[in-house]
Amino acid sequence: MISFIIPVLNEEKIIEKTLKWISEYDGEKEIILSDGRSTDKTIEIAKKYTDKIIVYSGTERQTISDARNLGASIATGDYLAFVDADVSIKNPNEFFKTALNYFKENDKMVAVTGYIKVLPEYETLADKVIFTCFNYMWIFVSNVLHIGAAFGEFQLIKTDVFRKLTGYDKKHIGGEDHEMFRRLARVGKTFYSTELMVYHTGRRAHKIGWPRLLFNWGLAALPPSLQKIFLGEWKVIR
């Protein structure tokens, strides 16, 4: 079974589209919404599609690591599919059949991710060039060097391995997705697939601009103690 985990905060504009395509997957699944205390209609919309909704109750500002880990804490599936709220996957049945086959064909496989693209209706030339460069760089790092590399839009991870590693490192303000795959690669095999096309809106780059986002990604590669000094926080973009 796949446990789909979607971290959200005030996603009323897009969450229904995301939950609809997940609902189209015919395999055994559960859909978990991990909510950071939304004040809009996110939860109201999600109730039509989700099996479980868990709401953050901490006093400190919730990080994306906290949100993903919170959703994973109530998951019962064999695999955890972490999906961002603005992600779209075409033909989910074929997509996840392919994804699960990677695990079946190699018992050392612990995590799989896909090729990240911006949806055609939103994609700019800069999106196409930059994501192509990063995709092929991460393919080389993950599949050839076996270091482990991934974006956070989509990650499919074996539940037992995820829990042994105690989940995403909440000390990371950014770059927690990449850091998770580096740790996974130390205990098993990770794979960056060109067969698995994962689309998203590209809203962060479009909102703050690619120069600033690339700079922030650079800061997110720093150790957590330095991230706090130079990055401060990963701001919400809606």
Image: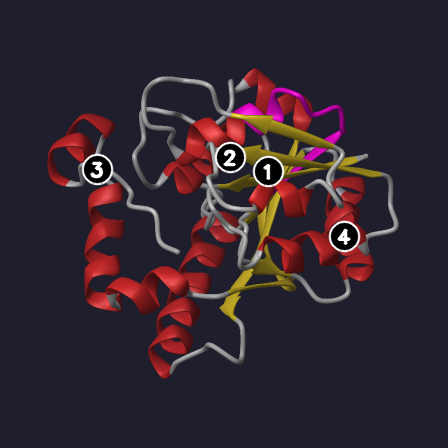
Q: Magenta segment range? A: 70-82
Residue 160 in percent (x, y) is at 67, 21
Residue at which label 3 appears: 222
| In this picture, residue 207 sits left or right of residue 29 | left
Tell me the kind of residue under disc 1. Answer: Lys
N-terminal of the two: label 1 or label 3? 1
Q: Which residue is mark 4?
A: 96
Specify few, some or many for label 4: CA neighbours under 10 Å numbering under 14, 14-19, or 20 or more: some
The residue under the point 71% across, 67% down is: 90
* SS class, disc 2: helix
Q: Does any portion of residue 190 appear in the rendered image?
A: no
Mark 2 vs 1: CB contact within 8 A: yes
Which quadrant is the C terminus positioned in? bottom left
Give the left or right position of residue 5, taking residue 212 as reference: right
Q: Position of residue 183 (x, y in %)?
A: 46, 30
- Identify which residue, 216 or 22, lies in the foreground: 22
- In x, y percent, where is residue 105? 79, 44
* Mark 3: secondary structure: loop
Sequence-first tag of 2 and 3: 2
Report, in whole angstroms, how far the alpha carbon at label 4 lies from the one at label 1: 18 Å
Mark 2: few/some/many CA within 10 Å (<14, 14-19, 20+)? many
Looking at the rendered structure, the kind of residue marked 2 is Ala
Single out the mark in the foreground, 2 or 4.
4
Q: Residue 196 appears at what percent x and percent y?
A: 65, 61
Q: Nearer the viewer, mark 1 or mark 3?
A: 3
Q: Is residue 2 magenta?
A: no
Q: Marks 2/4: CA distance?
A: 21 Å
The tag earlier along the polypeptide, 2 or 4, is 4
Give 124 or 218, whichever is nearer the viewer. Answer: 124
Report the residue marked by disc 2. Answer: 185
Q: Which quadrant would the N terminus be assigned to in this image?
A: top right
The residue lying toward the viewer, choosing from 41 and 163, is 41
